[in-house]
Image (cartoon, coloured by chain):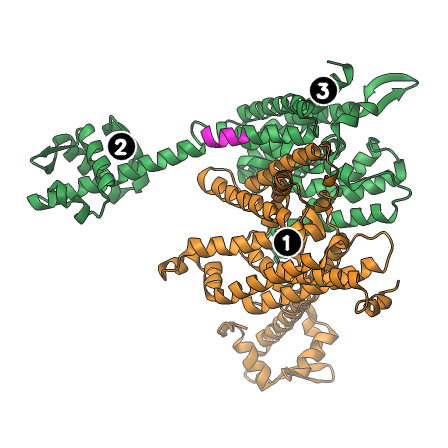
Chain colours: A green, B orange
């Protein structure tokens, strides 16, 4: 590996970690799209800052742009408070307007500004090592590494300082204000950190892919765990993985690094979305199918309980009486037999003793409680699940 | 070129006419279908889908190698639809919320699209230039053929809209009722979503990926402030959308260095701002005026109630009292007294006031009124 390669990967890793941390909280607070809004509406801030400083990595520009990001949040809240439109409409109105203002400012001053909308939106990590931080002639490494390093340090510091407050205000804002941690303060704190992160990162990975780096690791982690600390660690690990794997993939096919980082994130998310053990699509669908069969069995058991006459309990009448398809009826009856809840004699189904107990308990449960609570009863009685 | 020269040129210049017609039609269809997106609380779907369309464009180019905009838009439509249904799948089958699902589809698809675009750019075939116009939109590249497609699609969606008007409306406001009436809600839902995606994809070439969401939302959000009727809203939104298209094109054509997309969006934004402030029913301005009027009215009635409290202690309610004694009560001013007199609730004679018959009855019934719905 050459030294620019190492530097690029280092920058990518730092950006990914810095994005993943606020991203977790944005996803948990159902504000994921605010990151999208901020990442677009910082454009006018960047342009004005660039007019003044002529340097995309100047701290002043970053601050100004971050303020524009906060302005977006405030504007969205003001519009929402008028009650004229819903929150998502407010978000959808504010950021394209600010973005348009930025685009027009760039277009109007195209001759004086060496700033490209493409560059802001898409970024180019491959060029990042060329912009060096020079202090009295000493080469201290790429500027954007320093910028993002500082942002990351601030983020991590704030995370450790306010972890408890953030946690409480994220999951129970009522409790948080009762305990004396202002949820509003936490909200704006988080918004400020997200704003600064987005601004610091746009130069390297572009405004839209910042959104991917914020949301995708957090969403993937959310499908794997319900523990906040674990979620943070998984997101960070995913961010780092996507940074390194994305770099080499891009290197291999000779394409945009940020695009390939996002693609890696996308593939990982797709995999987790499909195969996550508890919350993945396949296990959810399987569980739903299981539950359908079990509910059918329950209905069938109750039906048996109500009828002593043989013709109601004859196998051939199953699809007539409870209106099941043949296959369905077969799975349900098999499940019942497997669990020793019913016995079949000469094609006539009858409840076993265990089945009787279960039905009685279930009936009682349904009358007195919410019927979804029956889940743990099934665990007691069912050796095999649907 | 000035603003007015533009309108003169409009009838003679081919390019201007094409672009103006294109943006107007686009504004109209976006406004029309955007109304449904806004009311279905899918406002940000536009943002997500416009980004999600990018890989479709790139893949369509990779497969066909042609830059025919209709082929590319077909690709965009397919990947936009995949994005939409994935968003649905995520929100219905996992515990990820809609904002996360939208953000994921938006950024992941876009990132993949970027990867493909940069990949295409490195290919040794010179045909690929111009694909990035879909990122920011270039109204100037609109051809008569593109506009014809737009008009055709608008016509079809208008026809479908009218044909399924009742179904769309009932699904919008009471989906459960629609199901109990036996409508195939799934089908209607997919139909309207399909047309919203179609409108988004259609706008990519003109206003680009980023600004498409505003194109879809702004006319509808503006129209919503003026009416409570769906039909009027759809119509108004189409008018607002078309006007912002025309005005935006005119402004950007009459100045140097102004790209059309952002200007159209800003014009639409002005419509929204104007509607938020000045709409008579919901606007901020008139609401504030109404609040003030109600507050003043309430104060006046409080003063009257106080006077009633004094007058009640006398056998004759019209017995005059000195104005001085009202000083105990802070809500009295010269103006409020004359306002009370104007309403013929009190009579002022010199330094004394007395309740009239009308004022006495008003004060007595003040707390016994039936609520009036206005």
Which residue carries the number 1 mark? B202
Prevailing secondary structure class for the magenta stretch in the rendered image? helix
Other residues around mark 1 within 10 Å, as few (<14) / some (14–19) / many (≥20): many
Residue farthest along the top direction in this orientation: A1
Q: Is residue A363 magenta?
A: no
Residue numbers of the magenta segment: A269-275
Residue B359 visible to the viewer: yes
Residue B313 in view of the camera: no
B22 sits left or right of B173 in the view: right
The residue lying at 59 percent from left, 24 percent from top is A238
Q: CA distance from mark 2 to mark 1?
A: 54 Å
CB under 8 Å between discs 3 and 2: no
Q: Which residue is mark 3?
A: A10
Spatial distance from mark 3 to mark 2, Cα to Cα? 53 Å
Res A325 → quadrant: top left
Decide: is B256 above or below B133: below
The C terminus of chain B - image quarter = bottom right
First in sequence, mark 3 or 2: give its number: 3
């Amino acid at each position: 590996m050459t030294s620019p390669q190492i530097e690029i990967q280092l920058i990518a890793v730092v950006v990914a970690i810095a994005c993943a941390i606020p991203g977790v909280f944005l996803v948990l607070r159902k504000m994921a799209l605010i990151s999208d809004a901020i990442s677009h509406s910082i454009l006018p801030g960047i342009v004005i800052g660039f007019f003044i400083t002529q340097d995309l990595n100047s701290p002043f520009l970053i601050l100004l742009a971050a303020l524009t990001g906060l302005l977006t949040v405030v504007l969205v809240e003001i519009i929402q408070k008028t009650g004229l439109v819903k929150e998502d409409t407010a978000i959808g109105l504010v950021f394209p307007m600010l973005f348009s203002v930025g685009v027009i400012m760039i277009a109007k001053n195209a001759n004086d500004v060496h700033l490209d909308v493409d560059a802001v939106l898409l970024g180019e990590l491959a060029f990042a090592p060329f912009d060096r931080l020079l202090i009295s002639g000493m080469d201290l490494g790429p500027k954007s590494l320093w910028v993002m390093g500082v942002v990351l340090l601030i983020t991590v510091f704030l995370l450790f300082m306010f972890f408890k407050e953030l946690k409480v205000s994220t999951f129970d804002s009522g409790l948080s204000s009762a305990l004396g941690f202002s949820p509003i303060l936490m909200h704006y704190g988080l918004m400020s950190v997200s704003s600064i992160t987005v601004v610091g990162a746009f130069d390297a990975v572009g405004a839209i892919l910042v959104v991917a780096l914020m949301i995708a690791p957090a969403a993937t982690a959310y499908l794997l765990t319900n523990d906040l600390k674990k979620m943070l660690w998984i997101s960070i690990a995913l961010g780092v993985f996507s940074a390194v794997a994305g770099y080499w993939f891009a290197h291999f096919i000779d394409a945009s690094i940020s695009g390939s980082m996002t693609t890696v994130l996308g593939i990982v998310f797709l995999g987790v979305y499909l195969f996550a053990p508890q919350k993945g699509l396949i296990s959810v669908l399987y569980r739903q199918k299981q539950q359908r069969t079990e509910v059918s069995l329950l209905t069938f058991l109750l039906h048996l309980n109500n009828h002593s006459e043989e013709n109601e309990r004859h196998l051939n009448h199953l699809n007539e009486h409870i209106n099941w398809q043949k296959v369905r009826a077969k799975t349900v009856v098999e499940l019942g037999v497997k669990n020793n809840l019913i016995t079949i004699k000469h094609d006539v189904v009858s409840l076993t003793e265990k089945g009787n107990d279960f039905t009685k308990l279930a009936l009682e449960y349904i009358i007195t409680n919410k019927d979804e609570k029956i889940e743990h009863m099934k665990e007691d009685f069912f050796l095999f699940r649907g | 070129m000035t603003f007015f020269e533009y309108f003169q040129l409009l009838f003679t210049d081919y390019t201007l006419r094409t672009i103006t017609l294109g943006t107007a039609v686009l504004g109209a269809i976006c406004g029309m279908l955007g109304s449904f997106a806004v009311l279905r609380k899918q406002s940000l779907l536009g943002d997500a889908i416009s980004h999600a369309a990018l890989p479709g464009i790139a893949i369509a180019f990779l497969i066909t190698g042609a830059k025919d905009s209709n082929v590319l838009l077909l690709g965009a439509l397919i990947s936009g639809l995949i994005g939409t249904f994935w968003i649905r799948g995520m929100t219905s089958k996992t515990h990820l919320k809609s904002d996360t699902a939208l953000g994921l589809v938006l950024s992941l698809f876009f990132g993949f699209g970027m990867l493909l675009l940069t990949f295409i750019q490195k290919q040794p075939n010179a045909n690929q230039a111009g694909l990035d116009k879909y990122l920011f939109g270039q109204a100037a590249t609109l051809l008569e053929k593109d506009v014809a497609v737009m008009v055709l699609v608008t016509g079809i969606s208008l026809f479908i809209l009218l044909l399924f008007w009742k179904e769309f409306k009932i699904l919008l406001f009471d989906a459960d009722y629609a199901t109990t009436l036996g409508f195939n809600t799934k089908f209607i839902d997919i139909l309207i979503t399909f047309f919203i995606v179609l409108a988004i994809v259609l706008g990519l070439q003109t206003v680009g990926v980023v600004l498409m969401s505003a194109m879809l939302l702004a006319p509808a959000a503006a129209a919503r402030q003026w009416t409570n009727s769906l039909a009027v809203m759809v119509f108004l939104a189409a008018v607002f959308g078309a006007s912002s298209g025309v005005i935006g094109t005119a402004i950007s054509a009459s100045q140097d260095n102004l790209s059309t997309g952002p200007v159209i969006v800003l014009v639409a934004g002005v419509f929204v701002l104007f509607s938020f402030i000045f709409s008579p029913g919901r606007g901020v301005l008139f609401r504030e005026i109404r609040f003030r009027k109600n507050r003043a009215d309430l104060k006046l009635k409080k003063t009257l109630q106080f006077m009633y409290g004094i007058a009640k202690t006398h056998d004759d309610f019209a017995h005059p009292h000195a104005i001085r004694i009202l000083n105990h009560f802070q809500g009295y001013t010269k103006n409020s007294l004359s306002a009370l007199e104007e309403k013929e609730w009190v009579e002022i004679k010199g330094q004394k006031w007395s309740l009239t018959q009308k004022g006495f009855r008003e004060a007595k019934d003040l707390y016994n009124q039936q609520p009036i719905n206005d």
